[in-house]
Image: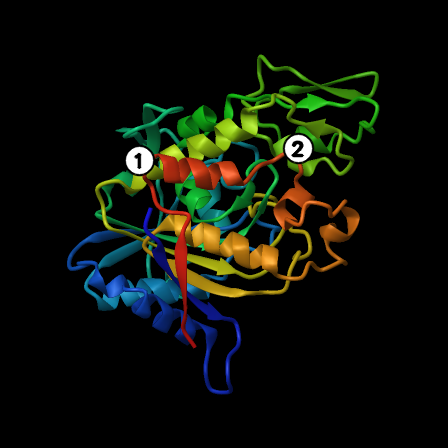
Amino acid sequence: MASSQVYFTDMRCKVGESLLGKLDRLIAKAGIDTIDFKQKYVAIKIHYGEPGNLSFLRPNFAKTVADKIKALGGMPFLTDSNTLYVGRRNNALVHMDAAFENGYSPFSTGVQNIIADGLKGTDDVEVPVTGGEYCKTARIGRAIMDADIVISLNHFKGHEMTGFGGALKNIGMGSGSRAGKMHMHNDGKPEVDKSVCTGCRACTKFCNQKAILFENNKARIDHNLCVGCGRCIGVCNFHAISNNAGTSELALNCKIVEYAKAVLEGRPNFHINIVNQVSPYCDCHGENDAAIIPDIGIFAGFDPVALDKACIDAVNAAPGITTSILGDRDRTHNDHFTDIHPTTDWRSQISHAEKIGLGSSKYELLTIK
């Protein structure tokens, strides 16, 4: 498979130069203006961040991208789908409140926010997945499927179930409606190690299905109610909850990729990964841990697979910050993501995306000053 071009700029800025200006130049060099935006609806897939988390992307980045698209004649809007789990983004009303609280308003970005799957997360479209092995169809938020063009603007970070979260996850999982998210998550169900469980009950605050019960002050997960979203794994401070279903993380990564293909196939698309504040967990958490590496920069291109792979390589080549979670881990894998989440395998996301023709893991990195 041929290499894809990935464009990169670092976070350094001379006096009189802004990072937003570098972002604007980067996406221009990467060829965003080769897309015909004139009078086209353009979905900018974003993650607004769960309130309390401070590592999500600043809205200034979104404004720069939206301004570029408007200058090219497009009609952009910011969008995300509702979440499956308890939080402040599981229906359109609280989701919009969360977006505004985190600075994503039409006054700061110059464009509207549209929650892709509607008020209750039920406004979706069933989309065929060409070559899908895990999903024959995908349930995608209607507003995203109504768009003519898709641009993903992604915070690159770690993730407790997929190893990492970048363009593929933001597009695949993030575009899925609530029914779609359940479809992606439902292969594996977590278990509780009662010898480690302290009975703190933090996990119950994040379970939307009321599937976590307590017996003798120890948690137990009712698999008849559990949808396998994995939120309880990430919020347990005592590592008492894990997914021992063997292939569930593999299935999740593959389903995410197949959902991403359903979103992107047949439409112009372009992708931007911002590799700063690389937190060990998803921005879906209502908190964020310390960054695991120093800030690296911004990557952009037309191939989301090559883009994510370039970011993975850059993160793993960077020195780990020992005052972060990496200082608590057994660092024997020579891989920051695996060191943090040893039960995950991020490689399955890349390899399956390549297998189904979504992109190439081979890339040529072009640096823009």
Distance between the alpha carbons at the discs numbered 1 and 2: 28 Å
Q: At which x and y percent is residue 338?
A: 64, 43
Q: Nearer the viewer, residue 78 or 166?
A: 166
Residue 346, x across and y down, in percent: 54, 40
Question: Residue at horizontal 69%, vertical 56%?
Answer: 290
Most distant residue in the bottom direction: 15
Mark 2 surroundings: few (<14), some (14-19) or many (≥20) residues within 10 A: many
Label ID, residue 262: 1
Residue at which label 2 appears: 233
* Colour scheme of the rendered structure: rainbow
Res 130 → quadrant:
top left
Against 128, residue 18 (above or below) is below
Q: Is residue 7 left or right of residue 101?
A: left
Q: Residues within 10 Å of mark 1 (few under 14, many from 20)?
A: many
Is residue 181 depicted above or below 10 in this figure? above
Q: Position of residue 181 (x, y in %)?
A: 45, 30
Q: Quadrant of residue 144?
A: top left
- Residue 167 visible somewhere in the drawing: yes
In the rendered image, the vertical position of residue 91 relative to residue 51, given as above or below: above
Task: Please report contact status of discs 1 and 2: CB closer than 8 Å, yes or no.
Answer: no
Q: Name the amino acid type tagged 2.
A: Ile
Instruction: Identify which residue is drawn at 31% across, 25% down.
Output: 137
The residue at the point 45 percent across, 61 percent down is 59
